Image (tube, rainbow, N blue to C red):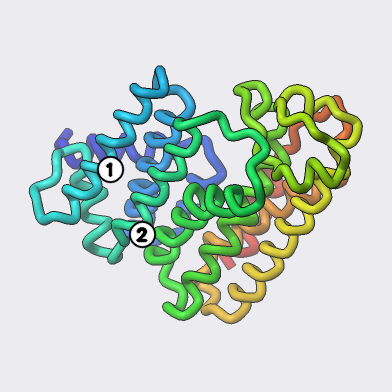
Amino acid sequence: MTQVETTQDASAGRAKGSSFYLAMRILAKPQRQAMYEVYSFCRLVDDIADEGGTRPERHAALQQWRADINALYSGATPPPALRDLAVAIRDFGLRREDFIAVIDGMDMDVVEDIQAPDWNKLELYCDRVASAVGRLSVCIFGPPLAEREGLAHHLGKALQLTNILRDIDEDAGIDRLYLPKEALEAAGITSHDPLSVAADPRLPAACKPVVARAQDHFAEAERIMDRCPRASVKPCRIMDDAYSAILRGVVARGFEAPRERVRVSKARFFFSLLRYGLV
C-alpha cells in the first residue's frame, strides 16, 4: 500500500461511523476525499483541545498545527501526513484563514474552560469552530459564490448551537458551560458552575433564547439553500435535516433534569440521504 493510500484511508477512517461520513458518500470522489481531509483536520485539532494533556501541551500542539497550515500555504513541500490536505487546498481554493480560525476556536477551549460566555464570545466561538468549517466545506460543495459565506455562517451556527443545547450534561462533565450568561441571568441563574447550572430548575428558561437563535439560523440557511442549485447543497441539506431534527427532539424532550441524550435514528438519517442525496 502506498503512503498516499495510507493517509487517505486514515482520513476516511476518522469519519467512519459518523453521520458526516454517510452524508459525504454522495459526493464525487475528489470532493469526498477533500471533505475527509477537512474532517480529519477538524477531528485532530478537536481531540487536542479536549484530550491532549495539560493546557501548555495542548496549546503547543495547536501552535504546531498553525505552523503546519502556514507551511502548506508557503509553497513548501508538505509532509506526507498532510499531502492530501494540500491537494484539497489546491484543488478547491480552501483559505488559510479558515483553517486558522478553526484552530483559534479550539484554542479558546484550551486557554480556559469556557463557562457562561457572553453572546459576543459565544458568537465568535461558533464562528471559529463551526462556521469556519462551513466556509471550507462550501468551497468543496460548490454552491454559487454569492451564497457561500451566508450559508456557512447560518448553517454552521445552527449546528453548533444545537450541539450546545444537546450536550449540556456532557459539557458540564468536563467543566464547560456554553450557554450565554445573558440568557442565564435573564432566567435568574447567577451561578456559572456547569454542574450547578445543569441541575438548576430554571435551566429551561435559559435555553429558550438559544433555541430561538438556532431556529433562526436554520431558517436562514434553508432560505439560502432554496436559492442554490440542488446538487450544490445536497450535503448541507442532509446535515440541516439531521440537526434540525435533533433540535426539535431536544425541545420536545425539554431541559428539565434528568435529560436523555437526543439522537437521530438511522432510519431517519437514511431517509434524509434518500430525500436529498440520491433523488
Q: Is residue 71 visible?
A: yes
- Rendered image quadrant of residue 275: bottom right
Residue at 34% over, 22% down: 57
Where, by quadrant of the figure, is residue 94 drawn? bottom left
Query: Would residue 79 be found to the left or right of residue 247 on screen?
Result: left
The vertical placement of 125 against 218, above or below, is: above
Q: Residue furthest top?
A: 53
Quarter occupied by residue 234: bottom right
The location of residue 138, given as percent across then percent down, is 44, 65
Q: How many marks?
A: 2
At x 83%, y 25%, the residue is 199
Labels 1 and 2 touching (C-beta < 8 A): no
The residue that label 1 is drawn on is 66
- The answer to which of marks 1 and 2 sits earlier in the sequence is 2
Q: Nearer the viewer, residue 221 or 65?
A: 65
Question: Where's residue 95, x and y in %?
Answer: 31, 61
4, above or below 227, in the image: above
Q: Is residue 258 left or right of residue 41?
A: right
Residue found 89% across the figure and 36% down from its top: 202
Residue at the spot 51% in from the left edge and 57% down from the top edge: 131
The residue nearer to you, when weighing 138 against 24, is 138
Can you identify the residue that label 2 sits on?
31
- Camera-nearest label, 1 or 2: 1
Residue 277 shows up from this direction: no
Of helix, strand and loop, which one carries label 1? helix
Q: Residues within 10 Å of mark 1 (few under 14, many from 20)?
A: some
The picture places residue 21, in percent across and down from the top left corner, at 48, 45
Amino acid bearing label 1: Arg
- For badge 2, the amino acid type reads Gln
